[in-house]
Image: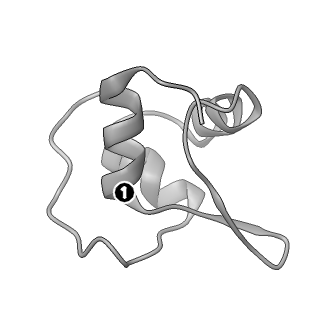
Amino acid sequence: MSNNAPEQPSNQLVSQTEIAKILGCTPRTISNLIRRRKIPVIKVGSLNRFQPERVVEALSEGRSI
């Protein structure tokens, strides 16, 4: 995963495909990270949404949510 995430407002929510592009990985990798509780996810109805800043922070700290 690359660390060249574009600057995004911290309150902006992005889709699983968008967060995968930001991180330079596949949507499948994002699914695995969600399942292993490695990244924070916000449920909007049945959809997963992400705050890019929080996801990058969680991955850089190596912490579980």
Q: State the residue at coordinates (36%, 57%).
A: 52
Q: In this view, does 36 lie to the left or right of 26?
A: right
Q: Is residue 47 left or right of residue 19?
A: right
Is residue 33 shown above or below 47? Answer: above
Image position, residue 7 (x, y; %): 14, 63
Image position, residue 46 (x, y; %): 85, 71
Q: Which residue lies furthest to the top in this view?
A: 62
Q: Which of 27 and 59 is in front in this view?
A: 59
Q: In this view, does 41 lie to the left or right of 61?
A: right
Q: Quarter of the image containing the N terminus?
A: top left
Q: State the residue at coordinates (58%, 56%).
A: 16
Instruction: Kindly identify the amino acid type of the residue bearing the numbered disc 1.
Output: Pro
Is residue 13 shown above or below 23? Answer: below
Is residue 17 shown above or below 47? Answer: above
Q: Nearer the viewer, residue 4 or 9?
A: 9
**Residue 4 lies in quadrant:** top left
Image position, residue 30 (x, y; %): 59, 38
Residue that carries the numbered disc 1 in the rendered image? 52
**Residue 41 lies in quadrant:** bottom right
**Residue 8 lies in quadrant:** bottom left
Colour logic: one colour
Q: Nearer the viewer, residue 48 or 40?
A: 40
Q: Quarter of the image containing the C terminus?
A: top right
Q: Residue furthest right?
A: 46
Dot 1, how many residues are within 10 Å of its Cα: few (below 14), some (14-19), or many (20+)? many
Element at badge 1? helix
